[in-house]
Amino acid sequence: MAGISNTIRDLRAGRSMTQQELADQIGVTRQTVIAIEQDKYSPSLEVAFRIAHVFSVPLEQVFQYEPPRTKRK
């Protein structure tokens, strides 16, 4: 499937961090964290950088982008 995926759930688990704790640190609601983790919502660039900063990892370690595949004729 093309689009943006993320490793937030794994990063949180590795630090025993709750969704609420992450939400508080990045300035969003817990519901927003849930939606981002489930790939139902793509965060703004600023929020994406905040998430990476909380985990002290590069942005590319948190979010991955797979472009849509073009159909061959």
Image: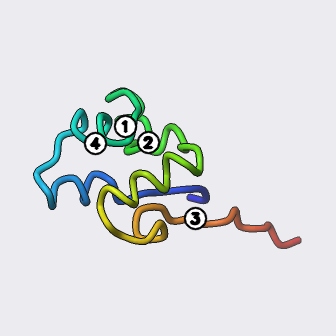
Disc 4 and disc 2 in contact, CB within 8 angstroms: no
Q: CA distance from mark 3 to mark 4?
A: 22 Å
How was this image coloured?
Answer: rainbow
- State the image coordinates of residue 44 (x, y, percent, origin top left): 58, 44
Q: Quadrant of the C terminus?
A: bottom right
Disc 2 and disc 3 in contact, CB within 8 angstroms: no
Q: Amino acid at mark 2?
A: Ile
- State the image coordinates of residue 29 (x, y, percent, origin top left): 37, 27
Q: Earlier in the sequence, mark 4 or mark 1?
A: 4
Judging by the rendered image, the residue that carries numbered circle 4 is 22
Q: Which mark is residue 53?
A: none
Q: CA distance from mark 2 to mark 3?
A: 14 Å
Disc 4 and disc 1 in contact, CB within 8 angstroms: yes
Horizontal side, residue 8 vs residue 16: left or right? right
Q: Quadrant of residue 69?
A: bottom right
- State the image coordinates of residue 19 (x, y, percent, origin top left): 24, 38
Mark 4 or mark 2, whichever is nearer to me: 4
Q: CA distance from mark 2 to mark 1?
A: 5 Å
Q: Quick one: 39 or 52, which is closer to the camera?
A: 52
Badge 1: how crowded within 10 Å, few (<14), some, or many (20+)? many
Badge 4: how crowded within 10 Å, few (<14), some, or many (20+)? many
Q: Residue furthest left?
A: 16
Q: CA distance from mark 3 to mark 1?
A: 18 Å
Horizontal side, residue 16 vs residue 73: left or right? left
Judging by the rendered image, the residue that carries numbered circle 1 is 33
Q: Amino acid at mark 4?
A: Leu
Judging by the rendered image, the residue that carries numbered circle 3 is 65
Q: Amino acid at mark 3?
A: Tyr
Q: CA distance from mark 4 to mark 2?
A: 12 Å
Disc 2 and disc 1 in contact, CB within 8 angstroms: yes
